[in-house]
Image (tube, grey):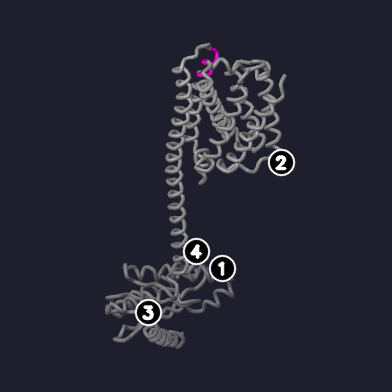
Amino acid sequence: MRVAPFAISAVCYFLFNAAMFAGLEAQAGFAAPRRGAEIAVFAGNYLAFAALSMLQFNLVANWLVICVLFLFEIKWAFRCPWRASLLCALLVSLVGLGANEFARSLCAIAFDVPQSAFSNDIGEEGNLKTVPVALGFLLGALLLCVQRRVLRHGETAVVYGNDRSRRFVLAMGVLGYLYLCSILLLYYVDVNALVVKVWALKASVSVFASLSLAFYYAYRTAAVIRRSEERRLLEREVAEREHEGDKLQDIVRRDELTGCCSRRFAEARIDELLGRGRPLSLAFVDVNDLKGVNDAGGHEDGDRCLTCVAAVLDDVASGPDDVLGRLGGDEFVVALPDVPAAVLRKRLEEARHRLRTQSDSERSPFSMSVSVGVASARPGDDAASLVARADAAMYEDKRAGREAR
């Protein structure tokens, strides 16, 4: 057995193996391979290649074995999923097989010999298989390097990441691989016809071209699907953020305990109504003796008292532009546009009566009463000045209530 044919083909195959590892790491988005994996895979594959050549197995069987080896080696070296390993192994094997068939057919034309002259025993005296094998691995390495240069923006990882695109490329790869395997049968036909050699050349080029188009189509499809998914995720995230923003706005606008407008939001609404020049009546409402309710029944009773008062006042401020706000503690404000002050006072007297009837009941085991001051808007008023006049009127009402008792 001659050493030179093995040494020459070993060097060329090492370059093919190195290009394969560089391409998989750069394009497929795999993690870095295990330490020493590149050398181990090269040694294992080349030993298998040499053994298959010496045993003179059928070329179709040779390349099927090589494809299976690639499958397990890529899975082991890169710790990637089986489905990604299968597609990678198929594509790498297809590049190697297509490049070898192209080189063999080219050498058959150049040497004017039938393709059967390149037998499967590279140790046979006078066998010319070393030349096309070396050229085939060099061409395969070149193709893998070109592919890595062209596909340098994660296109391969995009295809691997989409089930539909991956299955499509896998199906096209299987068809191309089986077609190239069928072309290997020409190497067992002792015919020195140019048309046969050109047919084999054309087969390799056709498979490469069709697979490139299939990959491009799969990438475009996967990219569109990924962008659609990203857009949907972005829309969902925007909707969630808007919902969160609405909730935050609601927290800012609403008093958490009573559900009334917050002081700031209530004053802003009142300023807005005043800015429109609409007649406005405003009431300042103070809950009487809330401290006594808290002391007697605890803060839970105090909170229940405030929610009961807020519920009754909410019936007073029932219009679409009416404002009910909690200014803080036991103080509320009611603002009704286009409603005279006398009408507002009458509604508040009815509210007082409802609170008295609900007091000291099983549901509200405490006394509830409020002091009320009403003011009408004047030219030049803002929320602060109008609330201040209503507050002063409320203190008059509270004083009068104490004197009546």
- The residue wearing badge 2 is 35
Q: Residue 300 has which mark?
A: 1
Q: What stretch is highlighted in magenta?
A: 183-188
Tag 2: residue type? Arg
Give the CA distance from mark 3 to mark 1. 26 Å
Q: Which of marks 2 and 3 is nearer the N terminus?
A: 2
Give the CA distance from mark 1 to mark 4. 13 Å
Residue drawn at the location 42% of the way across and 67% of the way down: 311
Q: Residue 283 has which mark?
A: 3
Tag 3: residue type? Ala
Q: Is mark 1 on a helix, strand or loop?
A: helix
Residue 373 picture location, percent across and down: 39, 82
**Relative depth, front residue between 65 and 148:** 148
Residue 349 picture location, percent across and down: 36, 76
- Neighbours of disc 4 within 10 Å: few (<14), some (14-19), many (20+): few
Tag 4: residue type? Arg
